[in-house]
């Protein structure tokens, strides 16, 4: 794989786009107000902002029909790489177009051609120098873990991610959850200041070589720590582990990757930790924001099966829809189940699960086009007004932080870890008859 090769590989798929515009809308909208699937289309307000528009640009550049312009680069920068277009397109076209792969290819081509936007390059410089896109010092990365004892080698490696690592408002909740896991008897390793970027943002910005280098470094660290299970608090990380690392050809054998919601749910089922219906939210109802990265973009990577694609008088057919995932295999149920364990009901937003609407925080948009990121957040928060709930919960620190910046009282946005932390408790292994090692494995 190299940065310039992807457009060629994807060109035929890009050129199959029929300009039908289905990728702009959720497949079965419940209302006109919230029928949009595409935050960049909503911001640009022109076909160019949609996946189809970007595929036209990618194809035109790959065929040498036109070159880059500043407005084209700005339009591409408004795309959050949220994948809603891909899910919507697959409903009609299965995997014969695959818009998201086309968007990955377009950004990789921009990097290869030296056309990556200046702010994307600045983000990459910060990742290279500091291991995070915010440019915050490595020496502060592990501050959240002050007082916690980790092992240099353990079966389970805790990965936190840069957003929560540096968000001091989340340190108490992180500490409480990890301390509970240790009190339940789990031996945990943590990379501390050596934890770097998972590579998700680098990939989204089109810097695929750099993303692969970051991935290789991380997997080397996991093996050096002797870990067979990586538990991450980051939705970007679980997304890149499951949907992007496999594309890179990295040896992931013997390592499983879990989001903390999946891990806590499994520990609850095995009786190692308990969640009590208590606190201010118990007995109440909240709305839940499905993060793109945690949901549809954590679906395990499935390589397109082009060998079965046939042309029948101009009609293309790929493998049967039954063999496709349609983004339904992301992480949707674990956070909802944890809320239920705490006696909290979930009221679904109009656009939920694989059809969720991006909050605008991903794909470099927050860093590059804050106005587009803000508009997406406001669009998402407007859905809350259609529900009985004034509380929106997210299992992603990045989404919760971004949405929280733009929410208007009396509505509030809560990070799931802040609800879990006070309600999570270790169970005695004598009571359960299960050892921590058995529970973890
Ligand atoms: S990307 Fe898919 S859904 Fe969008 S216009 Fe093209 S064919 Fe239609
Ligand atoms: S990835 Fe998201 S923002 Fe980008 S074109 Fe697709 S739906 Fe629109």
Image: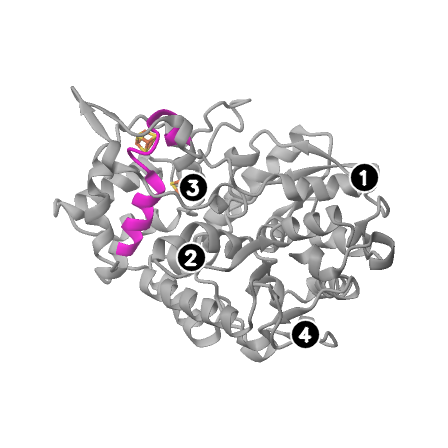
Q: Position of residue 369 (x, y in %)?
A: 43, 53
The residue under label 2 is 368
User: Label 3, label 1: how many angstroms apart (C-alpha)?
Assistant: 32 Å
Dot 2 and dot 1 residues touching (CB under 8 Å): no
Which SS class for mark 4? loop
Does the image show residue 415?
no
Q: Which mark is residue 343?
A: 1
Disc 2 or disc 1, which is closer to the eye?
1
User: Label 1, label 4: how many angstroms apart (C-alpha)?
Assistant: 32 Å
Question: How would you rate the neighbour count of disc 3 (Cα within 10 Å): few for under 14, some for 14-19, many for 20 or more?
Answer: many
Q: Position of residue 422 (x, y in %)?
A: 81, 55
Indicate which disc, 4 or 2, sits on the residue closer to the N terminus.
4
Which SS class for mark 2? helix
Give the quarter of the figure containing the N terminus: bottom left
Identify the magenta region: 88-108
- Name the residue located 30 percent from the left edge and 53 percent from the top edge: 107
The residue under label 3 is 83
Relative to 389, residue 154 above or below: below
Disc 3 under 8 Å from ligand 2? The reply is yes
- Name the residue located 68 percent from the left edge and 70 percent from the top edge: 144
Q: Position of residue 320 (x, y in %)?
A: 35, 26
Dot 1 and dot 4 residues touching (CB under 8 Å): no
Relative to 321, residue 82 above or below: below
């Amino acid at each position: 794989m190299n940065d310039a090769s992807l457009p060629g590989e994807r060109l035929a798929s890009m050129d199959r786009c029929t300009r039908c515009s289905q990728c702009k809308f959720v497949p079965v909208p419940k209302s006109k107000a919230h029928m949009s699937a595409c935050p960049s289309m909503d911001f640009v307000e022109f076909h160019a902002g949609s996946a189809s528009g970007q595929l036209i640009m990618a194809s035109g550049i790959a065929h040498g029909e036109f070159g880059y312009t500043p407005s084209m680069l700005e339009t591409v920068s408004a795309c959050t790489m949220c994948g809603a277009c891909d899910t919507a397109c697959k409903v009609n076209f299965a995997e014969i177009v695959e818009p998201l792969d086309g968007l990955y290819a377009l950004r990789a081509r921009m990097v290869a051609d030296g056309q990556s936007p200046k702010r994307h390059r600045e983000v990459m410089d910060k990742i290279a120098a500091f291991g995070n896109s915010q440019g915050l010092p490595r020496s502060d990365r592990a501050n959240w873990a002050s007082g916690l004892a980790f092992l240099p080698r353990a079966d389970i490696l805790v990965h936190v991610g840069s957003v929560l690592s540096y968000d001091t408002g989340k340190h108490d909740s992180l500490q409480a959850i990890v301390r509970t896991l240790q009190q339940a008897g789990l031996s945990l390793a943590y990379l501390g200041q050596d934890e770097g970027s998972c590579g998700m943002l680098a990939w989204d910005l089109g810097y695929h070589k750099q993303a692969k280098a970051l991935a290789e470094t991380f997997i080397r660290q996991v093996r050096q720590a002797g870990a067979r299970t990586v538990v991450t608090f980051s939705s970007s990380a679980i997304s890149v582990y499951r949907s992007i690392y496999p594309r890179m050809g990295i040896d992931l054998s013997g390592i499983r990757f879990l989001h903390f919601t999946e891990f806590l749910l499994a520990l609850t089922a095995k009786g190692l930790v308990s969640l009590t219906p208590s606190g201010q939210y118990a007995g109440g109802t909240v709305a839940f924001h499905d993060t793109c990265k945690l949901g549809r973009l954590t679906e395990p990577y499935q390589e397109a099966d082009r060998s079965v694609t046939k042309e029948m008088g101009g009609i293309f057919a790929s493998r049967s829809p039954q063999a496709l995932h349609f983004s339904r295999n992301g992480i949707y149920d674990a956070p909802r189940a944890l809320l239920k364990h705490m006696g909290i009901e979930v009221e679904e937003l109009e656009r939920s699960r694989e059809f969720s609407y991006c909050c605008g925080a991903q794909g470099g948009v927050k860093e590059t086009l804050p106005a587009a990121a803000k508009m997406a957040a406001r669009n998402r928060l407007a859905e809350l007004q259609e529900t009985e709930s004034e509380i929106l919960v997210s299992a992603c620190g990045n989404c919760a932080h971004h949405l929280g910046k733009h929410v208007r009282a009396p509505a509030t946005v809560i990070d799931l870890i802040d609800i879990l932390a006070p309600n999570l408790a270790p169970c005695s292994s004598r009571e359960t008859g299960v050892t921590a090692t058995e529970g973890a494995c």
